[in-house]
Amino acid sequence: MSDEFHFSALEIASLHDRAIALWHREPDAIMELGNVRPDAPSFVDLVLSQHRANFDLWHTEDRARAPRATDYDLAEVKRAIDRLNQRRNDLVERCDAQLLELLRFSGLPNPGAELHSESPGLIIDRLSILALKLYHTEEEIARPKAPEGHRERNRQRLAYLTEQRDDLVACLDKLWAEVLAGTRRFKIYRQLKMYNDPTLNPAIYGSAQ
């Protein structure tokens, strides 16, 4: 494997945090990662794009929960959620595909190794969601004029979420170390969503008949 490739779950979690803070300040900002080629995104670029899909999905879902949302609003939000979910899952698969391509040059993953049930891309997706939960929980702790007990409840929530992310970061780094050692392997698990495919969703193809 190329010595230029460096994998760190802790750095991925840090990237998630920095991106969320930036996007809340500047919704259309693009993080400068250096040497970005649009035609050949790096692994970090894919991680960041996948995270952006989760970021947009989080805030789009909030629109659906607005008390004054109309039926039209809800229909538009539902379509947007479907599109973002598709992008989110596609990018998880692309992250895994790029990792497997990098591993291939070293004859890895070892086909005889024990199979891990969750791929790195799926774990990175979970880390992305945890980063969003952490950010918004911290917002609630700092919320002006919050009801009594609100801050304390959210401090407890923040502690739980922090522990969960620390555990997941350690698990991802351990998985990667075991893959490199040839004692563990992973596959791409295709999501095979049906709702966005006009040939598989009867609500779509049935309406055209």
Image (cartoon, rainbow, N blue to C red):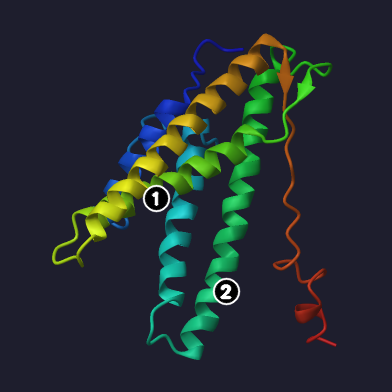
The answer to whether residue 30 shows anywhere in this view is no
Disc 2 residue type (three-letter): Arg
Say which mark, if any, is on residue 132: 1
* Residue count near mark 1 (Cα–Cα under 10 Å), binned few <14, some 14–19, many ≥20: some
Q: Residue at x 30, y 54 (%)?
A: 153
Q: Residue at x 42, y 27 (%)?
A: 10
Residue 102 in picture, x, y percent from top left: 64, 21
- Could you tell me which quadrant the N terminus lies in? top right
The answer to whether residue 130 shows anywhere in this view is yes
Which secondary structure lies at badge 1? helix
Q: Is residue 90 above or below residue 143?
A: above
Residue 175 in picture, x, y percent from top left: 61, 22
Residue nearest the viewer, comparing 52 with 133: 133
Asked if labels 1 and 2 touch by Cβ distance under 8 angstroms, the answer is no
Disc 1 residue type (three-letter): Leu
Residue underneath mark 2: 79
Which secondary structure lies at badge 2? helix
Q: Is residue 180 above or below residue 193?
A: above
In this rendering, position of residue 151 left or right of residue 168: left
* Total count of labels: 2
* Residue count near mark 2 (Cα–Cα under 10 Å), binned few <14, some 14–19, many ≥20: few
Q: Residue at x 42, y 55 (%)?
A: 55
Residue 101 in picture, x, y percent from top left: 68, 25
In this rendering, position of residue 205 left or right of residue 127: right
In this rendering, position of residue 14 left or right of residue 130: left
Residue nearest the viewer, comparing 187 with 160: 160
Residue nearest the viewer, comparing 112 with 103: 112
Of the two numbered discs 2 and 1 on the same chain, state the one appearing first in sequence.
Answer: 2
In this rendering, position of residue 111 left or right of residue 131: right
Mark 2 → mark 1, Cα distance in angstroms: 22 Å
